[in-house]
Image (spheres, rainbow, N blue to C red):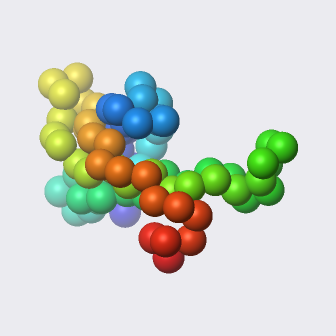
């Protein structure tokens, strides 16, 4: 399994580009939960943010669109 470059659009991770695991066809997962690092910062862990795969943008980078934010622990 390799990795693919993904740009997050909307929500708190807007314009963040990072590598995600790719399936056999080279596509990222259908959905991705962006989690805050545990225990970092003055407030500790934060909510989880759900993103959905949209498609490649023509430059080889895939796009993940913001869907919603869930309170800490709801997505587990």
- Left/right placement of residue 67 relative to residue 43 reads left
Between residues 62 and 46, which one lies in front from this camera angle? 46
Q: Is residue 5 above or below residue 57?
A: below
Q: Is residue 48 above or below residue 7?
A: below
Q: Is residue 56 above or below residue 22?
A: above
Residue furthest right as drawn = 42
Give the residue drawn at x 16%, y 25%: 58
- Left/right placement of residue 72 relative to residue 22 reads right
Between residues 57 and 66, which one lies in front from this camera angle? 66
Between residues 48 and 18, which one lies in front from this camera angle? 48
Q: Position of residue 75 (x, y in %)?
A: 45, 70
Q: Position of residue 6 (x, y in %)?
A: 35, 38
Q: Position of residue 29 (x, y in %)?
A: 29, 59
Give the residue drawn at x 17%, y 56%: 25
Residue furthest bottom as drawn = 76
- Left/right placement of residue 8 relative to residue 63 reads right
Q: Is residue 9 visible?
A: yes
Give the residue drawn at x 46%, y 59%: 70
Give the residue drawn at x 35%, y 32%: 10
Q: How many marks?
A: 0
Q: Position of residue 62 (x, y in %)?
A: 26, 37
Quadrant (top left/top right/bottom left/bottom right) for the N terminus:
bottom left
Between residues 26 and 73, which one lies in front from this camera angle? 73
Q: Is residue 2 visible?
A: no
To which quarter of the image does residue 8 belong? top left
């Amino acid at each position: 399994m390799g990795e693919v470059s993904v740009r997050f659009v909307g929500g708190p991770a807007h314009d963040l580009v990072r590598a995600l695991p790719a399936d056999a066809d080279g596509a990222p997962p259908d959905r991705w939960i962006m989690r805050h690092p545990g225990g970092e910062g003055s407030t500790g862990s934060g909510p989880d943010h759900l993103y959905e795969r949209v498609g490649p943008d023509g430059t080889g980078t895939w796009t993940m669109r913001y869907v919603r934010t869930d309170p800490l622990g709801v997505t587990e």
